[in-house]
Amino acid sequence: MSQQSDPDHQSALGAEPPTAEPGRVKESTPEHPAGEPEESTLPTPPPLGEPVKGDPKFGRPGPPINTNNPFYFGFIATIGALLAFQLMKIVADLSQTITLVVIAAFLAVGLDPVVRYLQRQGLRRGASVAIVFVVVIGIFGGFAAIIIPDMVDQATELVNSAPDQIDNLTKTPWINDLNAQYGVIDNLSKQIRDRASNGETVMQVFGGVLGAGKAVLSGLASTFTVLILTLYFLASLNNIAEAGYRLVPRSRRTRVRALGDEIIKRIGGYVAGQVAVATINGVCSFVMMTILGIPYAAVLAFVVGVLGLIPLVGATIGAVLVVLVGLFQSVQIAVVAAIYYVIYQQVENYLIAPRIMSRTVAVPGAVALIAAFGGGALLGVLGALIAIPIAAAILLIIQEVLIPRQERA
């Protein structure tokens, strides 16, 4: 055998026998009785909380909190419920401010296509925004300078002539028949006289005047706020969108940016198209009322244009209002106005609106109807205005993201 494998030879050369591995039982010796394990050579960890060399400045972190403890779950659930309630209260308190911000954002998105068109002509975005904003302010200022004085005069005349208009209405034969059967006009006149003779009515009217003045000042302040926010959003729309895209993971940022730009384009086109359709409706209504001799044409045309911004039902409400005012003049004028609006609605639905809105949003009629009524129920007129573009954005995401993913599954 070789020398390396001969233990007697190794002992003779003075080599020490191999030591036992830590933790293994050594042979019985006076120092280590048989059956006792050898002490481990690994260092014993210090007690928890005592500083150790190399630990952080404020010591080692303790064990994690036991999340399975019922007390922990109840505490966290209670805190979450309180925070949710407080958040809802804050949103309710800021509802007017949120409404102004949403209106300004939609106006900015609606004006963005015009700004982009000027940019394609070689102008910088700042110059394009300034031109668009000056033109918009000029249009509204000119409209206010020309129309508002006539609107105020006509509105005052409408209020002052209300008794005469009601008296003319009572002279209509079919109205007299209704009054003879049910006493509608007599009961209404009695209530008006009773309220006029009541002293509390004066205080209510005085409070109403103060409330009206306060509402006018609040409306002016809100309009100024919307204009300032619109200018800010329009100038920094690209930066705001880019900041939102940077919150998306980098691997998905390109696709999200493409979808986001398309959504902004569709919403902007929808807002601009809806304003164009409502403006055409208001102008045509003004011409019709001028021809028929319906009084207060400027006021009614402005109201029809504003109501035309409300999708699906706004134009119909404006038409009903004009027909009712025409009814104060004569039944024939009211019938002619009703026939005009029936014809105009067909022209608008099948000729004007498709041409203007063809490249903006494509929302099925049923979806648009449900979205408009749902948005109106949740947020009133504002909800009805923004419901259809939001529905268009959701449909785009479904078509471009959800359906392809389901096809690959």
Image (spheres, rainbow, N blue to C red):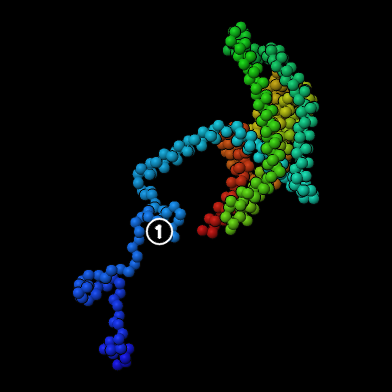
In the displayed structure, does residue 133 sit left or right of residue 38? right
In the displayed structure, does residue 7 sit left or right of residue 67? left
In the displayed orientation, state which residue is furthest to the top: 197
What amino acid does circle 1 point to?
Val
**Closest to the observer, 8 or 192:** 8
* x then y, percent, for residue 401: 57, 53
In the displayed structure, does residue 132 sit left or right of residue 200? right
* x then y, percent, for residue 320: 67, 26
Q: Quadrant of residue 306?
A: top right
Q: In which quarter of the image is residue 232?
A: top right
* x then y, percent, for residue 226: 68, 34
Identify which residue is drawn at 68% across, 22% down: 324
In the displayed orientation, state which residue is furthest to the bottom: 1
Q: Looking at the image, is 5 positioned above or below residue 228?
A: below
Say if residue 56 shows up in the picture. Answer: yes
Q: Looking at the image, is 64 positioned above or below residue 105?
A: below
Q: Quadrant of residue 171?
A: top right
In the displayed structure, does residue 149 sit left or right of residue 169? right
Identify which residue is drawn at 59% across, 46% down: 394
* x then y, percent, for residue 396: 61, 49
**Closest to the observer, 397 or 18:** 18
Secondary element at tag 1: loop
Quadrant of the image for the N terminus?
A: bottom left
Q: Looking at the image, is 394 positioned above or below residue 22?
A: above
Identify which residue is drawn at 61% across, 48% down: 244
Dot 1 alpha-carbon crowd within 10 angstroms: few under 14, some 14 to 19, many 20 or more: few
User: Which residue matches tag 1?
Assistant: 52
